[in-house]
Amino acid sequence: MSPSDFFFSFLSLEYSPEQTALKVFSTSASGEVKIRMEESGFAAEPPITVSQLFVESVRKYGNYTALAFKQGDQWKTMTYKQYHEECRKAAKSFLQLGLMRFHGVGILGFNSPEWFIADIGAILAGGFAVGIYATNSPEACLYVAENCEANIIVVENHKQLQKILEIQERLPHLKAIVQYSGQLKEKQPNLYSWAEFMKLGSKVSDSRLDEVIASQKPNQCCTLIYTSGTTGNPKGVMLSHDNLTWTALVAGSTIRLREATEFQEVVVSYLPLSHIAAQMVDIWLPMKFGAVTYFAQPDALKGSLGNTLREARPTAFLGVPRVWEKMEEKMKSTGAKSSTAKRKIATWAKTVGLQTNRRRINGSSSASLSYRIAKKMVFKKVRKALGLDRCFKCYTGAAPITKETLEFFLSLDIPIYELYGMSECSGPHTITLPETFRLTSCGKVISGCKTMLYQPDNADIGEVCFWGRHVFMGYLNMEDKTAESLDTEGWLHSGDLGNHDKDGCLYITGRIKENVFLNCPGEKTALKQYMYINIYVCVYRSKRRYICILEGLRCNVNEDTGEPEDDLTPEAISICEKLGSKAKKVSDILGSKDKTVYNAIQEGINRVNMKAASNAQKIQKWDILEKDFSVAGEELGPTMKLKRPFVLQMYKDRIENFYNE
């Protein structure tokens, strides 16, 4: 069947009496939704399944490298044709193990070719691909596996295996466990190594798998993305085949990814694949455009990411704010140890870089002689040292990033473009491009989608709502939660507050459900910007007469446990020294209530308060925690977002003291 035949056959289904009766949302595992087709543009593109996307990719890019991974010190590769064959083998093995339609395949571990193959294999076999955060506790794994009725769970290693063995007796739908890395240290019934698992599929015919694939529809669910649980129990975000395949087409076209037949793009996979941002960037965009995905090492976020970037030299890179902040901290620390002459040259170059790029934002295309010299002497060398010498698509998302960090990289001639979205819209909703680059803006809505600001106030700030084929189907088995997010007309309510500038660029200004709003662009971003040595800030009011905050200081993190340590980071120590403090540890500051540091924090709060619209929006009291918030301490979710309900419960006595004093 040709693409045009497929398109018109789908339209005939879409507008038949049966299809017209479909809603744009569903919470049933086997449910179907009405795809939000339009008459022209990207929204009129024929809907396709994941299998159809992959087959087309193999046709176009079959002999191109799809995946690159390290074995020892050597990079190994896999072509698109081999990649597809491996995914089909995995799909047949899942069928042999008894995977049922619309049941989950949980995947627990760090990024690897096996993670991708298990994910896509689960979809081809008619199940749900379900990423489970590698930092999850056994109980958190239990919740996800129960909710998606997982038939099979794929784990990375013995450590992750122990979590599932601890809970397997409480999982009635579980039929098998597969370990994809390392040797099995114990043999149990229905526990398989990756090699054993991949051989199981030889007993399943191609025709049986093809029948399952042929039964799949673009408007059915194929992937579950579980929210990180920062506001309660995780919810299973149901993404359809069309959500993934259409969003990959539009997002990639928006940022001008090139097809491999013209130029092969390169990305590095290191962010948690249980998050939609990582899946879209690492799996679906490369599949659509024939890019090659390099896999980072498991300790990427503990320091080895830089090595991978320098070896892979990506052409596109997505870093969550904390990744960019870590790069910034390391460069500042390295710079502080340089000779006086090198520091002066760097300072001069950064001044030139920031001035030049600010002029570009305002429409100037000219480049001064000073800029050209600075580029040759400093900017090119910095990019090469970071592994970003080929990367002119540097993005950030998933959380707010400070203006300070954006300006730091801009001064080095590395504009970081923001994108904005959520799991419930398959990743991106707005994307910044070079011609729409504005500091702290999230860019413009992607083609074929719409933004509505719901109930705007006098300053034209309203709740940001989404419409488009990227909007999710619903939350699995959660009609009430789905109704809270999707209104009767099908608009997705983000819970974020925002406004547009005269050019249509979106700015996020806060959250509806935040306990407090300050009259400035993002209260937590502003607080971190003004208070220098803080990482996370928990703002609290909630029906109280004034605002209070709890804050953590920048400290080192134990590489093995992820626990925050007492030692301040080199950057924090440097800031303390500039303030006139000799503090090297968090306890140094707290033990003596270091006046210089406390005064600096209060000064930052005063500057934030000056922007408040009323006394009710001013910060009245604050306190520093003995330990910074962390994933290990469960105050942060896997994407480094603050788990507000958990923090408020954990520190409820301390918060009460704010109001009892």
Image (cartoon, rainbow, N blue to C red):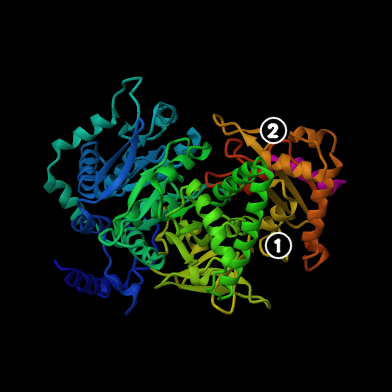
Q: Residues within 10 Å of mark 2 (few under 14, many from 20)?
A: some
Name which quarter of the figure residue 193 lies in. Answer: top left
Q: Residue at x 61, y 68 (%)?
A: 358
Q: Residue at x 74, y 44 (%)?
A: 575
Q: Which mark is residue 415?
A: none
- Which label's residue is closer to the chain start, 1 or 2? 1
Q: Residues within 10 Å of mark 1 (few under 14, many from 20)?
A: many
Q: Residue at x 24, y 57 (%)?
A: 57
- Tag 1: amino acid: Phe
> Which residue was labeled with disc 2?
567
Q: Which contiguous range is marked in magenta?
A: 649-661
Q: Is residue 176 depicted above or below 533 in this figure?
A: above
Is-magenta flag for residue 143?
Answer: no
Image spot of residue 97 (x, y percent): 24, 36
Does any portion of residue 496 appear in the rendered image? no
> Which residue was labeled with disc 1?
517
